[in-house]
Amino acid sequence: MLKRITKSALLRLRVPQAVQRFAPRRVLVLRFHSVREEPLLLDPYIPVGITHSARTFERQMQYIANTCNLISLDHLLELILHSLPTPKRAVVITFDDGFRDNYEIAAPILEKFGLRGVFYISTSSIEGRPLWFVRLRSWSTRTNKTWEQFLEASRRCAVLGEQQREQFLSELEGGDSVSDTFTMTWAQVRDLLKRGHTIGSHTINHPNLAKIPPADLKDEFEISKRTLESELSAPVKHFSYPNPILEPHWDPTTIQACQSAGYATAVTSTPGTVVTGSEALALPRHYVASSFREFVWNLESAFCGSRR
């Protein structure tokens, strides 16, 4: 209670903004996954922990539009490579996985405020099969597994190659019975690109890239890129490292594979902000709180230099 009151008082007095005048400028890459009218309804498939309510998301985007400067990943790359002056309160808005609600709910809200996002797509679930963590979530819910049992199965899936992962899922009781992918169609992905949003790769199958076999690592970078470029008839230069479970989720080997595949930027789930000299193929991102009050506090603190 005391912490909440203190934060509110500091925000009301605009203390973080005063500190920001003396702090080096930095870019916040915001990390989202899912935006839904009723997040609890799909919790058996997509955890509430990675979902924002549409109402809160709209308030957050209005705050961004009113107080920040949205920049593109291409602009961010120029800032990093050429040490150009960083715009005041610069942000990039990103979404992982390619969930259908990104198209149906998040994108219209962004556009309402003149904003555009970066949508990273895991290609196997676009008009394909549900991502493995969606299937595992459904399996654990329907069979009343404990949280630890779900985590143990997730740790197993995150480090397996594609064939071994699919075999493991097929052996679970109902582990391969989810029919809805909950992800966009290719037509929807193409429409986002047409409307001025950016499309990037989030691998084929959403593994932990730092843990899978080398041959699978190469495919996850390269085949996902080729698939996206074929479907979109446009170059795909940007990548997002999945962070399903276990650390690290990126390392020097994944950076090299990312570079070899031809990506210009790659974002991680490592907390932090982007400054001059940041590694373009391992950019930190900013955690986005699910409540509006915490979102504002975390955002303002990050512009002051906090890693949270």
Image (cartoon, rainbow, N blue to C red):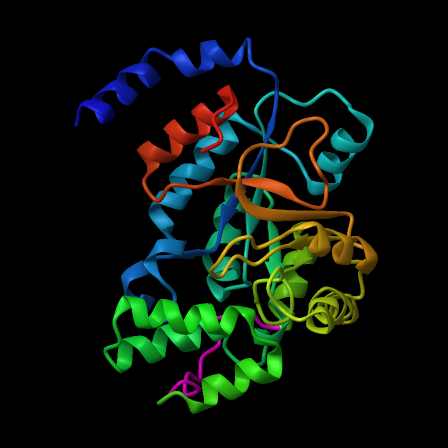
- Taking 254 as reference, is 56 above or below it? above
Where does residue 284 sit, x and y in percent of width and height? Answer: 59, 40
As drawn, is 197 to the left or to the right of 59?
Answer: right
As drawn, is 93 to the left or to the right of 144?
Answer: right
As drawn, is 77 to the left or to the right of 24?
Answer: right
Where does residue 135 sit, x and y in percent of width and height? Answer: 42, 77
Task: Give the residue at x 55% y 69%.
Answer: 159
Task: Give the residue at x 57% y 55%.
Answer: 249
As drawn, is 241 to the left or to the right of 180?
Answer: right
Residue 276: image quadrant is top right
Where does residue 75 sit, x and y in percent of width and height? Answer: 74, 35
Task: Give the residue at x 23% y 26%.
Answer: 4
Q: Is residue 253 magenta?
A: no
Where does residue 61 sit, x and y in percent of width and height? Answer: 46, 39
- Taking 32 as reference, is 187 above or below it? below
The C terminus - image quarter: top left
- Taking 175 as reference, is 262 above or below it? above
Task: Write down the region rendered in magenta.
Answer: 174-185
- 72 or 77, which lies in front? 77
Count the numbered circles shown. 0
Task: Give the residue at x 66% y 35%.
Answer: 71
The N terminus - image quarter: top left
Q: Is residue 38 visible?
A: no
- 75 or 194, which lies in front? 75
Q: Main secondary structure of the magenta part?
A: loop
Q: Is residue 159 visible?
A: yes
